[in-house]
Amino acid sequence: MLNGLIKHTINIPFIDIISNITDNEFIKTSIHSKTQIIQKEEDSTAIDEKKLNLNEIRLLVEKIFRFRRRYFKTIRYVQDNIRIDNIYWCTRIGMEDAGDTAILCGILWGIKTNLIMCLKRKYSLNCIYTDIRPCYTEKRFDIVFDCIVALKLGYIIITGIKIFLIRIKGGVEVERTSN
């Protein structure tokens, strides 16, 4: 971020699916995040332990669907007016076993190709560079993703006005009429 001025790293060492459902806990994660500011040489490290149960997951999914229903037209308006120019996506991946590395590289090529094709269907992409470089001797996973996304200021203002009007009206609920 900001030409290497700020670096942020998130490590998720494991996701534990709890078999003991007496506490109604379903998923337990331990997330380690680290932020480093280059000029000040300061590190801030945080460890979060989160436990989710099935009810929380269901409520989160319902909240996402309500948000999508409420702002669908506004999101579609922004998607129609976005322009994506240059995509540079380079990945270095390695496992200690050469066979595992080769299989993983093939899977990643398939995922990258499908994502780029989905973007090409929706947007006109000018310059695309994707690459996967296998490292057969060490464990490694590095991603460099650089992209230019352009949206004119007028569209941003119009979108802000639309969101403001939706919030004033309280949103539009999708209801069926009876026959």
Image (cartoon, grey):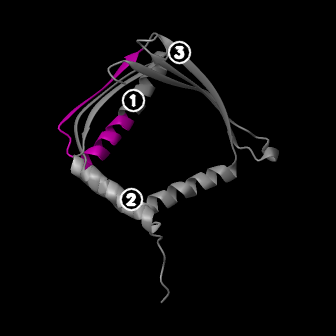
Is 72 displayed left or right of 60 in the figure?
left
Mark 3 or 1, nearer chain start = 3
> Magenta span covers which residues?
110-135
Would you place residue 122 above or below residue 40 in this image? below
For disc 3, the marked residue is: 43
For disc 1, the marked residue is: 106
Mark 1 or 2, nearer chain start = 1
- Residue 45 picture location, percent across and down: 58, 20
For disc 2, the marked residue is: 164
SS at mark 3 in the image: strand
**Alpha carbons under labels 1 and 2: distance apart:** 46 Å
SS at mark 2 in the image: helix
Is residue 121 within the magenta segment? Answer: yes
Amino acid on which the number 2 mark rests in the picture: Phe
Find the residue positioned furthest to the bottom.
179
Choose between 68 and 45: the one closer to the eye. 45
Q: Quadrant of residue 142?
A: top left
Is residue 67 within the magenta segment? Answer: no
Choose between 23 and 156: the one closer to the eye. 156
